[in-house]
Structures are given as structure tokens and as C-alpha cells.
Amino acid sequence: MKKVAISQSNYIPWRGYFDLISLVDEFIIYDEVQYTRRDWRNRNKIKTKNGAIWLTVPVKAKGKYYQKIRDTEIDGSSWKEIHWKTIKANYSRAPFFKNFAEKIENIYLFEEFTHLSKLNRRLISEICCYLKIKTKIRDSFEFKLAEDRNERLLRICKDTNASEYISGPSAKNYIDEKIFINNNIKLTFADYSNYGEYNQLWGLFENNLSILDLIFNYGEDTYKHMKYLKQYSSYNIG
């Protein structure tokens, strides 16, 4: 049984995003849809001594109300050093900061990105590698997509020979379950509820942060504080 998930790219996503990736054989980054402002596409949260703060990648969005995520350009490069210095300042004391810091630092300081999707894909891939997630990651532009939202998802599932489509829970608001049933594709929704607390720097626990917070605090034991990720396995559950 081949499992597939489809989701828009996020900037240094939270642990639920990587749990979803770990559940499937193929993960499709769905960036052929409209870019949404003030969303997870270009920002995420880390923890500081003053609480959670946003790290936001500036993008060229003025007047581009209908641009796709894939076409969204990054505005400038000065943010890169600022983001890295902010991450380093707030996590250098974390137990496993040194285990992963160099790889992330190289991306921020020495790699160039013109488009948001490319940046997000690079960071997601690096984090998956560290977490030993072996899922194949592909981009939605590789597929010929239909106009209707549900038909788009169905076509990707068919083109990847999926027998099961695992979706994030928010899709329950719009997804047409019948078209998957009629095409013999099992539809499953990932459960993001009841994520437990874990030890963090800087006082009381803050939920829904970038997964970098968990990695810097737990290193290779990050999987112990996720719901689906399993250590040293193919990560696909039945």
C-alpha cells in the first residue's frame, strides 16, 4: 500500500509537519496554489527569553495578490544573517545545538535563494535528513494539475499510484471524500492533537514552535516527542 501526503511548503515547520512527512512514502510540496500572507509559508516561531517570536522571510508580495507560492520571490538577503544570529543567540545553550547548527548555518549564510519555495524545500530536506526521514519529496509542478482543488489532489494521488492519501486535519473543511472512495483511494486524516510538552530553554513551555526548538533541545531523541516519527526505521506505519 503506497501512502502519499500533499501539503504547501512552510518555513522551518513545526513537528506536526515532519510527522506528516514521516507517515508516507511520497510527500508532495503543493506550491502551485496562491501565496497567502501572514501564514506559515514565510514565517515561523522560535523561543527566546522573552517568549516566542516570529522569524519572517521578507517576500515580494505587493500588488501580487494572486501569485503562486512557487512564484513568490524573496525580498533581499539581509534577513538571512539576522535569522541565523537570532537562532544562535537563543539556542546556543541548548544541549544539542552544536549537533545541527553547522548545517543550518551553512544554509543561512552561504547558500543563495531567490524564491521562497526553494528556500523552504532546502530547509525541509535538511531537517528530514537529520531526523532520518526517508520519504521521497517531490514538487507539485511536476504534475499536470486540474482546476478543481479536489481533482488536483486526486490527480496527484493517481499519478503517484497512491492507494492511501493522508491529509492534514484542516482539509476536512473542504475535501470531497467521495471522489477518493470512488477511485479506490483510502482517505486518512493525520491527528495533530495531544502533542506532549518537552523541556525547553527560557521558562514555561511554548507550543507550536518551529521544529528547530525540539531538535536543539533533544537532538537524535527528537522522535521521542513526536507522534508518528520512529527511530531508525522507514517511518511508514500501518
Image (spheres, rainbow, N blue to C red):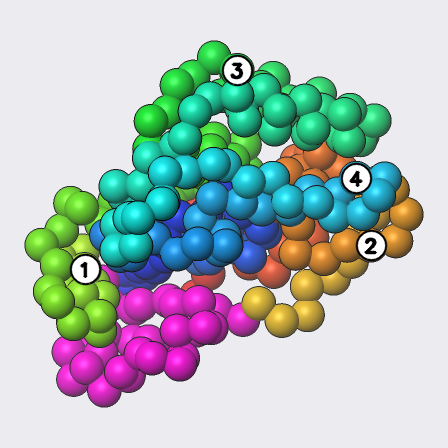
Between the residue at mark 2 and the residue at mark 3, the CA separation in whole angstroms equals 30 Å
- Find disc 1 in the rendering and name its residue: 156
As drawn, the label of residue 48 is: 4
Counting residues from the start of the chain, the first of labels 2 and 3 encountered is 3
CA–CA distance in space, label 3 to label 4: 21 Å
Depth check, mark 1 against mark 2: the one in front is 2
> Is label 3 or label 1 in front?
3
Estimate the x, y position of residue 50 in percent, counting from the top left: 84, 43
- Closer to the chain start, of discs 4 and 2, is 4
Residue at which label 3 appears: 109
Distance from disc 4 to disc 2, alpha carbons, whole Å, reads 11 Å
For disc 2, the marked residue is: 205
- Which residue type carries mark 1? Ile
Helix, strand or loop under label 1: helix
Query: Which of the marked residues, 3 or 4, is nearer the chain's N terminus?
Result: 4
Question: Marks 3 and 1, how far apart in space?
Answer: 35 Å
Q: Residues within 10 Å of mark 2 (few under 14, many from 20)?
A: few
- Whether residues under marks 3 and 4 lie with C-beta atoms below 8 angstroms apart, the answer is no
Q: Nearer the viewer, residue 162 or 60?
A: 60
Q: Quadrant of the C terminus?
A: bottom left
The three-letter code of the residue at mark 4 reads Thr
